[in-house]
Structures are given as structure tokens and as C-alpha cells.
Amino acid sequence: MNLEFPYSEIETPSPSPNPRMDARTVKEEEESSSNGGRRRGRRYWRCTKNDFFPETSFENITTYKSALSQTFPRLKNRLLARSSDANELVVLQKESERPMQKCLTWWDLIWLSFGSVVGSGIFVITGQEAHDDAGPSIVLSYAISGASALLSVFCYTEFAVEIPVAGGSFSYLRVELGDFIAYIAAGNILLEAIVGAAGLGRSWSSYLASMINTDNPDLLRFRVDSFAEGFNLLDPVAFFILLVANGIAMSGTKRTSWLNWIASIVTALVIVFIIVVGFIHAKSSNLVPFFPMGVQGTFKAAAVVYWSYTGFDMVATMAEETKQPSRDIPIGLIGSMSIITVIYCLMALALTMMVNYTQIDVNAAYSVAFVQIGMNWAKYLVSLCALKGMTTSLLVGSLGQARYTTQIARAHMIPPWFALVHPKTETPINATLLVAILSAIISFFSSLDVLSSVFSFSTLLIFMLVAVALLVRRYYVKDVTPRSHLVKFLVCLFIIIASSIAISAIWNSDGRGWIGYAIAGIMLFSGTVGMALLPQQHVPKIWGVPLVPWLPSLSIGINLFLVGSLGYIAFLRFVICSAAMLVYYFFVGLHATYDVAHLNQEISNNLESS
């Protein structure tokens, strides 16, 4: 267990005073001891200053000015401050006042992962990349991307088993890489949640309109000429579907899981139909040439189709509501992603054997493919399946995004009011409403091209950081790891990251010479070997990633390679968004988290002195 963060000095945390307690709250806490631990008179729907800004720095204008004057010393304090497993599992959960219901099994997690990952991407991206880049080798593109996604799933699974909380990657990074990096990740997670949900809502609306009239995807939108271009097509359907999906998520986790399970079963049956019919009408001649654009086209397509696998991280946030995390999470996450990888490869192979890659429709590959073999009615089945896939992605996304937000609020990086869990539904309604309202408003006004491209960079960066955090967890424990071993570990980690960036840079500069790749590859291999020779300081108690450091190192390399493929604009947008997040951090988040850490340090000192 890592015990570097101020709170974490309490080895077995005792119930600590909540910084939001006033005299009335203390009385309610005393009353709760005879009421099964549930606070009497503590209403869920409340809205006071102390619910949003309970920290000492925000008591009045004088204390706030004093806090601002200490910005740089506080930043130094928080820059490398790390949380602990105990803090994330016990202390922070008290901020929600009530626990979430433990109601999910490995069966639920498998179908939640299926519903989150298998959306419209497989139906849209497959045809586009098979036609433009990979040809029949698109099946290898899906296999490569699936293997990469599975490496990230391994890293997430080890963390989720040992730290089964709602925060997912935010909590993992906070424990191993510190508060500051976790805040940057948290900001990008919230940005992804809000804008990503808005984009999915607009896609849902476009797909429904295309089913009604294939020539007009804007059929269900209203044009307002006085608004700026990109914001002048108002979309009430996207607004409505986002509110409905989030409303279902707020009503209860088990109910949402049950609805997702039913819908995903239908999708699975349609996918089996597509694969079977595809192979019945398959022609082996359509697989020649297998690499029409060369191996480069296969890898280029792999970077694009990777997005068909994203969404599993949302399932990791459900660990807090899982009945037996040590058993259910590995089966649910690893099992589902392995099955999904096989399904994607079979679907891609069925498409390219059924229709020559040059004749694949880039906009509606499977629907048009069925028309080409004389099964016109089947195109409606495929369209309904894709629409349903987007719906389940919205449902599971609503669950996951709210739980990310809940843990971020528990850490006081955003107001702790968003961490509260409703007593009846046992779900974080406030956190769900935050994402739902903002994403619905954005989807109502903003077009898809305005919403695109920020999220891919953030997702891959977070996946890469989780792999780095796993290596830190295995090889560094404060007051246990010798300083000489720490220096060697940091050197090896630097070599792994630097060589991965070099490989990505060479590839994206159209370098085709073997010398650069050979040097960077040897450096990556050497850094991993050097780390493998170091003793591991932390051994997973229940389930761990196999072949450490090889698999996490490979995950770092692949994710950085894919980050590099996104181009300059994506990087620039990430920098701009992160800079905006830092403004909030310096004026609010830094001081809130500093106050909470300082309060818990005092509690720790009092306990030690007594």
C-alpha cells in the first residue's frame, strides 16, 4: 500500500470529521448512530454555500485572498502529493454520505462492457477503413487494436480489483502519480464525458433521421439563420435522448444494467446474423489482394478502428457497485473485451469476403452490403442494431461518467455537492445531472464537426498514464524502495516513454528507414529489460497484470504511437483545454484540495499523539 499522501498516514482509517460539519450536522451524526448509520434530517436536495465550498479558504473574502497569496507554496505541496488505497476506499466515500448499492456481478459487467463498447463505430468505421486504407487486412487492423485495448484492460483490471471505487482512472492516477496529474486527467475526463455524450446524442439524431430519409441527416433539426455556423442547427431529439438516458441511469444501477442486458442480447443476435450470412455469401477471391495499400495501410486503419474499442473504462468505474470485485471485475472486463475483439474480427472478415473492398460503401457498409447480395430487408435490421448500439453506449456512458464525477467531487476538485448519493435510488443523482444538463445543452446547439477531435487525445493519454501508474505501483513504495532502485526505475521509465515517442515521431514523419526504428526499438527493449531486472516492491494480493513490466511497457508504446497519429491539431486542442482547466485549478481546485489534506493531516497528528 502506498502511504505518501497526507491522509494516508492513517493505516486503518477511522471515521474522520467531515469538513462540512456545522453544529447541526454534528447533532444529526449523533442521531444517526441509533438509525442504522443513516443521517436523519439531512436532506438530499439542499443547496447551501457549505455544500459547494465547505473549505476554510472559501469562508469569506479575507480567507480567500489569503489562500490566493499562498498559491505557489500550496502548489508545491500538492504537486507530488499522492493519495492511498485506504483514502480512496474509505475516507473519500464518506463525502457521499451514503454508499452506492453493491448490486452488480460479472454477468452484469460483461454486458455493460458490451453495451458500452459495441456501438455504431463497428458499423461505420469498418467500411470506411476497409475501403480507404486496409482492404481485406482490416481484420488484422481490428486484431492489432483489440490487442492494444486488451493491454489497457489488464492495467485497469489490476487497479479496479485492488481499489474498487467509482473514480476509475482518476483514483488510480491520484494514488500513484499524484494529485496534480490526477487533476489534469479529471478535467479531461469531465470534458470527454460532457462533449462526448453531446456528440453521441447528435449522432443518434442523425442516424434516426437517415433511417427516415437517407438523403437528409438533418431532417429532425431546426435551422436558425441568425445563429453562427456550426451552432445554427438546433437538435431537440439529441437533447431529449440524452435526458432520457441519464434519467434511466439516475433511477438505479441494477435497472439500467437490466435494460442494457436486454438490448445487448438483441444486438448480439443481429451480429451473429451478420456474421453467418456474411460467411454464407463469402467469396475467397474478395480477399485478394489482402494488403492493397501495404502494411502501412493496415496500421493506419488500426489507429482509426481503435475507437471502436473505447468505453471499457466506463465499466471500471462500476467497481464500487460490484458484489465481489476480486472475481467479477477480471471476468467482466477481460472476458468481455476478449469476446468483443473476436466479434469485431469476424464482422470485418465477413464484410470483406461478402463484398470486394473497392465496392464497400464508406457511409453504410453493412446495410449496402446486404442490398448488394439481394437482401434489401436486412439493411433495416442493421440500421436498428446500430441505433440500439448508440443507445446502450449512452446508457452505460451515463453510469460511468456520473461515477467519475462523483469521485472527483469526493476529492473536492469540484464542489463536493456532486458527490452525494441519493438515499432511495442509491445513485449519484447530482453528478449525473451535471453531465446530463451540460451535454444536452451542448448537443442542442453544436454540430458534430464542432464537437469532434478533443477526446481521442485525452482517452489515449489517460490509458498511457494508467500503464505508467501500474509500473509505479509495482516498483515504487515510499520508505520501502531504496533510493538507488528508484533512480534506476525512473531512468528506465524515461527511456521507455522517450523511445515510444521517437517511434511515433519517425512513423508520422513518413520515415521508412530501418535505422531510426532499430535504434528506438532497441532503446525501448533495453529500458524494459532494465526495469525487469529491478525487484518489484508491490505484489498484487488477488489479481495482477502478467508479464510486468513487458505488457505495461508495450501498452505505453502502443498508446503513444496512436497519440502521435492524431496530428498537431488534436495536440493543440488538448493543450488549450488543459490550460483552461489549470485556471480553475489555481483559483479553486488547488485551495480546496489543500484544505482537505491539511484537515486530515491534523486529524492524523491528533490520533498519533493520543
Image: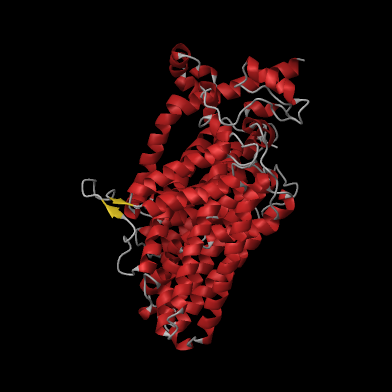
| Picture coordinates of residue 388, whole percent (x, y) | 50, 63
Q: Report whether 610 appears left or right of 216.
A: right
Q: Report whether 77 appears left or right of 132.
A: right
Of all residues shown, which one is farthest toward the left?
Answer: 226
| Picture coordinates of residue 291, whole percent (x, y) | 42, 77
| Picture coordinates of residue 142, whole percent (x, y) | 50, 68
Colouring used for the render: secondary structure
Query: In this orientation, which residue lies closer to the viewer: 329 or 602?
Result: 329
**Image height of 526 relative to 50, above or below:** below
**Image height of 129 relative to 456, above or below:** below
Query: In this orientation, which residue lies closer to the viewer: 28 or 351?
Result: 28
Of all residues shown, which one is farthest toward the top?
Answer: 62
Q: Residue at x 47, y 78 (%)?
A: 378
**Image height of 103 relative to 486, above or below:** below
Asked whether residue 263 appears in the rendered view, the answer is: yes
Q: Residue at x 57, y 38 (%)?
A: 406
Q: Report whether 359 appears left or right of 305.
A: left
In the rendered image, the quadrant that contains the C terminus is: top right
